[in-house]
Image (cartoon, rainbow, N blue to C red):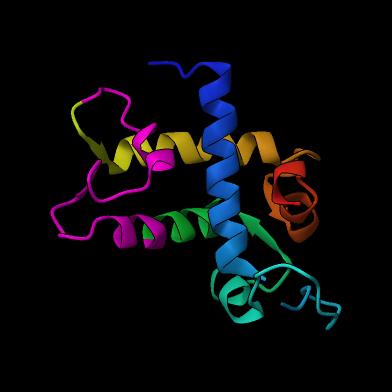
Amino acid sequence: MKLKTHQKTFAISFLLTALVMTACTVTPGTGKKDSSDFSTERWNHFDIDRNASLDKKEFENFLKDAFAKLDTDGDGFAHTHEVPPSIRRFDRNSDGKVAWAEYQASALEGFAKADTDKNGMLSYAEIASLDFLR
């Protein structure tokens, strides 16, 4: 099932906001603090090769971690009563729960859209420069 443009935009904004919120107070590689809620430790946890970018594998690791936190009862699904309204939109088949496959598909669509230079990685700048994060 294909998402509509507004659904893609919302999914992208949520996922990247979640990534950024869990990711960088010091901009990686600069040592400079910024005004966001980032934590270098969190960013580095997922940026395994320390290249200041998340490739698809690193992004998938982030997604798995994020999904595990959404699945509060550990049954393999993020039930709509367990998640914020922004995540409920990922329930593509409207069964009242978000399966890993639904979550992953929406997130990877967001990755592709956010990867503005199309190098297969999300840099700190690509994430932090998005208008909805300001």
Where is residue 123? Give x, y as percent.
74, 56
Quadrant of the image occupied by residue 90: top left
Give x and y (percent) for residue 60: 47, 53
The span shown in magenta is 65-94
Q: Which x, y percent locates residue 4? A: 51, 16
Q: Taking the image as drawn, is residue 72 in sight?
A: yes
- Frontmost residue, 83 versus 54: 83
Task: State the residue in front, 132 or 100.
Answer: 132
Residue pictured at 76% horizontal, 78% vertical: 26
Q: Residue at x 13, y 53 (%)?
A: 75
In depth, the one of 21 and 74 nearer the eye is 21
Residue 128, compared with residue 79, is above or below; it is below
Residue at left offset 59%, top offset 52%: 17
| Res 48 visible | no
In the foreground, 75 or 112: 75
State yes or no: residue 26 in magenta: no
